[in-house]
Image (cartoon, rainbow, N blue to C red):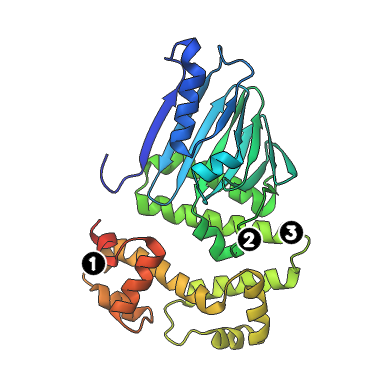
Amino acid sequence: MKDSSVFVEEATTHHVAAHERADYWSELINSYHRRLGYAFPRDSTFDGRTTVRRTTNYQLIGWESDAVTYYRTAGHVRGDSDDDFRLLVPINGQANLQQAGEHAMLPSGFGCLFTLERPFEFSLGEDTRGLLMTIPRREIDLRLGRMPDRAATAADLNSGLGRVIANLASSLFADGGDMTRHQFDTVASHLVELLCMHIVGEQPSAPGHLADVEAVVRRYVRTHAEDADLTGATIAHALGWSLRQIQLAFQHAGTTPRELIKEERLQLAYSRLRNPVYRESSIADVAMALGFGSASAFSTAFRHRFGATPREVRFG
């Protein structure tokens, strides 16, 4: 495996003795996530298969298996913390998820975003198949605001934006093994962006107008991230809205226009540091071109966002 490629791994119970399959599956799934509990209706004949695509930032697992129930207790949470989110997308069969007193029935065509930081019970019927994506909490917090008590959130993926999300997840899984880590992460980041737009749009309590304002501003900032004078005020003027409208929209989303601009510029910087086209540009040049006041300020913000220095990303 080249250093720049996506990690790929396949596993199956087919080659494991029947009486060892339940234990094998439990250890395998724990290695992908955190410590869970398991209930197998037919542990002596259980059969399952997984394929994993993984980078430092994201993990996407395709599975097919017999019936099984996964659960996570308060003790599991205390002893083995994991605050990242999971996106569950059943492709065949039905899944049932219970968390924080809420019950989500998920036939194929529906997805669910949930957290391992709260106890849950997740049951799969016979002959289920689907995708499970691990999403860093920071990627959700940046778009929806930090919600540590958030329970499972179901989303209809049968039509419109939902179907785009489901198709993108399937395509990322199918072709992710042939991508570089940067390509995989870029597609995954777009998938998360669309997912969060979809979730906000489906919440009855979310003001539709503010959600629309937020979506339009995000597109505008992505297009104009290189503009040195880009601010909430200049965005408002360009789009014909008041600055207050924009601030309210992003307050509802748990962030600010300033943080959004910073995020888009950091994402663009990350892309350029990985792109051979910009190899002749120094890290300081990349930073200055994107409106950062100094190389040191850029490096600090970059490391805080991505967990690595600009130099490590460029030469990693």
How many neighbours does mark 3 have within 10 angstroms: few (below 14), some (14-19), or many (20 or more)? few
**Residue 199 x/y as whole percent:** 67, 56
User: Label 3: which residue?
Assistant: 203
Numbered disc in front, either 2 or 3: 3
- The mark nearer the N terminus, 2 or 3, is 2
Above or below, 227 against 37 in this view is below
Report whether residue 243 is seen: yes
User: Label 2: which residue?
Assistant: 197
| Viewport quadrant of the C terminus | bottom left
How many neighbours does mark 1 have within 10 angstroms: few (below 14), some (14-19), or many (20 or more)? few
Q: Amino acid at mark 2?
A: Met
Given contact means CB atoms under 8 Å apart, are the residues at marks 2 and 3 in contact?
no
Report whether residue 241 is seen: no
Q: Amino acid at mark 1?
A: Arg
Q: Residue at left 40%, top 70%?
A: 266
Q: Amino acid at mark 3?
A: Gln
Q: Tell me if 115 is positioned left or right of 152 in this view.
A: left
* CA distance separating discs 2 and 3: 10 Å
- The mark nearer the N terminus, 1 or 2, is 2
Q: Tell me if 230 is positioned left or right of 205 in this view.
A: left
